Image (tube, helix red, strand yellow):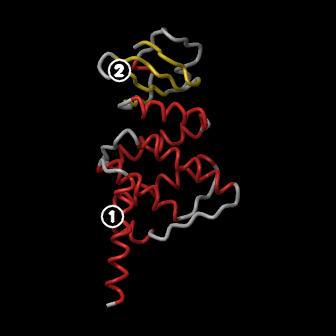
Amino acid sequence: MKVLKVLNNNVVIAEHEEFEEVILTGKGIGFGKKTGDSVGEEKAEKFFILHGKEEQEQYKQLLNEVSEDFIACMNEAMSFVKEQYKFELNEHIHIGLTDHLFFAVRRLQQGMEIKNPFLHETELAYPKEYAAAEEIIEYLNRCVGVSLPKGEIGFVTLHLHSAVSNRSLSDVNKHTQLVSNLTEVIEKV
């Protein structure tokens, strides 16, 4: 594969024979590389195929805003979830969830409160994704040295379910709100 762009020492965008543009991550994979240099697939710890220019641009922008350490934590957490829970995840989760959690950590550090009024309903609707989300939050808390609130587990659950089901996050949110509304109506009867 040929390097198209070095994003940082641990992330490069490369030209792949079959998938066109791919993102390769791995310790030192971009160190000393320039556009046009070759890079072996075996050197990559992670290999992302982001379909479409829009997804590729979103990931590039995210890499400019988020620290390498945070990206590494998220990549490890996602690898663990894929292996442990046997999830087939839409690659877009690497953008959406990393972005969400990076800004959740930033809000927490700024003293902003994070609330999730649908936490219980989310846990009931998506128990496997909820269990995985708990592990992601626990890992991220240790990796980054923060203590994200329990409500964040619900938000991560929705991202996971969206990636597993290949449905948009807004559709998944609507479904969760509907379940909450139905539960409220049933409890009143």
Position of 92 compared to 138: left or right? Answer: left
What residue do we see at 35% from left, 20% from top? 20
Q: Name the N-terminal-most of marks 1 and 2.
A: 2
Whole-percent x, y for residue 188 in the image: 36, 89
Residue linked to disc 2: 20
Whole-percent x, y for residue 109 in the image: 69, 54
Q: Residues within 10 Å of mark 1 (few under 14, many from 20)?
A: some
Toward the viewer: 127 or 90?
90
Residue type beneath disc 1: His
Which element type, helix, strand or loop, lies under badge 2?
A: strand
Which element type, helix, strand or loop, lies under badge 1?
A: helix
What residue do we see at 48% from left, 35% from top? 58
In three-dimensional space, the C-alpha distance between marks 1 and 2, rounded to whole angstroms, equals 35 Å
What residue do we see at 33% from left, 64% from top? 175
Q: Locate the N terminus and report the quarter of the image it occupies.
A: top left
Whole-percent x, y for residue 115 in the image: 55, 67
Is residue 18 shown above or below 99? above
Is residue 71 shown above or below 148? above
Number of callouts: 2
Q: Locate the C terminus and report the quarter of the image it occupies.
A: bottom left
Is residue 114 shown above or below 120? above
Toward the viewer: 85 or 57?
57
Most distant residue in the bottom direction: 189
Give the number of the disc on residue 108. none
Residue type beneath disc 2: Glu
Residue linked to disc 1: 175
| Image quadrant where residue 78 sits | top left
Whole-percent x, y for residue 4 in the image: 47, 16
